Amino acid sequence: MITTRYFASYAALTCSAGLMSAAALAAAPSADSVYFGGDILTMQGSAPSYVAALAVKDGRISAMGTKSAMLKLRGPATRLVDLKGQTLMPGFIDPHLHPILGSLILNAKFASPFDWSFPWGDAKAVRGNQAFLAKVEAYDAALTDPKEPLLVWGWLEPFHGQMNRQLLDAISTTRPISVWAYSAHEMIFNTAALKHYGLMEADAKGNSQIDYALGKYLEAGFFTQAVPKVAPTMMSPAALAEGMARFGTLTQRAGVTTMGDMATGSSGDFAGDVAAMKANLEKPGTPFRVLLVPDTNTLGLQMGDGEKLVSFVRALPAQNTRHLAFSNSVKLFADGAFFGQAMQIEPPGYRDGHSGEWIMQPDRLKAAMTLWWDAGYDIHIHCNGSGGLTVILDTLEALEAKSPRGDRRIVIEHFGVSTAAQAKRIAKLGAVVSANPFYFYSMADKYAAGNLGAERADELVRLGSLRANKVRFGLHSDFTMAPIDPLLLAWIAANRVTADGKARGVGEKVPVYDALKGITSDAAYVLHMDDQIGSLGVGKKADFVILAQNPIKTAPAKLRDIKVMGTVFEGVSANAP
């Protein structure tokens, strides 16, 4: 795969990654900028490596080496950047989040069991059933129009207890109130909201993922029936502009210069989602790029899982811009939500005896994997539980036996519950993982005392097992399943400490350098962009993050406290908000 065709850029330099020879330096044009005066961490290779200085020309790294050598590239307009002891490293990569979904949630009222820090005001944690209902009541009381819809995000059953239509009706029978589960895979409506959005009981009959009497829509029931009715109200141009402005602020503040939109079109309005992102993110000053990975589950439901869909996806790169681009990747879905305890897990299963859910039924998932395998695409598959993972690995094994994939990447997305044997099997089959370590941080204590038990909870997101089996992995937020904060994700991976301060599953910790690879070089590998970003080398994009301290030289327990001072995107500096 040649990723230079995905993002329009200035002419690529032909130098190989690494240091330039004296002859090459002598022949090189003057630099646009030269960076020196601090630790410059390249993220090349299996151990930390540094250069003293680097030069940038036309948005790419043009040279790397000693300070004196780089200063020979100084011209009349060259900008000299003294890091003054700060650390420069490749710009952070969040390989799995959702700009549209995240922007919508940022416009909702927060009632999450975890603290959230925002420039426009923090949202403190809410825990307990009565506290959650009281928060919804307070939001209701603050609205002056009794019929203005209220959307509250963050309900999580292990922390907040039961939620249903009747409890919300007790707060208001006139205001449409919707409670969006933390997982974003479920929504609970009061009676006024069901009427407001046109959600009819007759349409819900026979759907096991809808309980109309309780006002609950989950997984496929939510995505296929509720989302098409609710999304148009939530996605007005003004609302999207506000949410996406906030999304951009959080991204820049976190030091992220590349992200993967890992389900473009999941709202059901593919063209509308792409247009909204272009309208709000395709601007000269945007300091990051988004790799768009189409949700071929939703698209398949709309146009069929066949050649028509493949032809549609093949044509998408014609829409590429500097900041937004499709590549040779698609997104599929296996089992249900991790936070909603809808993931499929193998025996002994959930301790309360309930079963998980499927987003794509196994037969359809297998057929879709075959379709995209034969079409030559990288396949990213949402998978939270060990049951879903077995279906994926069984299918991958059969496909690999039929026609080896070459350089295509099969990516397990999320990787919540798994077994040690499955980690070995992932390695044997050559798959890679894009993991969400916030699963462990947020839920290990609750699941240990609840439906998984201590042993399985300790092994959530088993990154140590992946490393032991030489499986490459990226770390993602799946925003808003976790904050956009790559250093927090790396801290969790390196420390294995929960939100309530308990160390669990310490055998699954990884060294800090490996955790940093998960937000730089290995995250780039997950997105199949490692020839362009993720490490520092001559010819690569000049995407950097500048940190107050060197994370390699910082105690692992302090990793998440390192301040992002600013970013550089294709050679252009941007200070952190």
Image: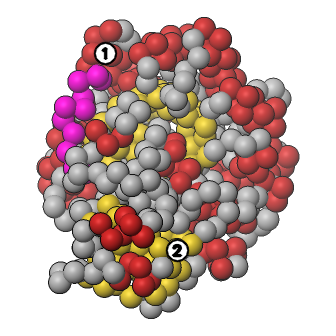
- Residue 372's label in the rendered image is none
Residue 478 is at least partly visible in this image: no
| Picture coordinates of residue 291, whole percent (x, y) | 35, 44
What type is the residue that disc 2 sits on? Val
Residue at position x 53%, y 66% in the image? 42
Considering the numbered disc 1 on the image, is that residue within a helix, a strand or a loop?
helix
Q: Range of the magenta residues?
A: 313-323
Relative horizontal placement of residue 154, taking residue 174 as reference (left or right): right
Q: Quadrant of the N terminus?
A: top left
Q: Is residue 3 above or below residue 41?
A: above
Residue 316 forms part of the magenta stretch: yes
Residue under numbered circle 1: 309
Residue at position x 65%, y 11% in the image? 401
Considering the numbered disc 2 on the image, is that residue within a helix, a strand or a loop?
strand
Viewer-nearest residue: 421 or 410: 410
Residue 190 forms part of the magenta stretch: no
Residue 256, picture quadrant: bottom left
The mark that comes first in sequence, 2 or 1, is: 2
Residue at position x 32%, y 61% in the image? 60
What type is the residue that disc 1 sits on? Leu
Residue under numbered circle 2: 51
Residue 514, picture quadrant: bottom right
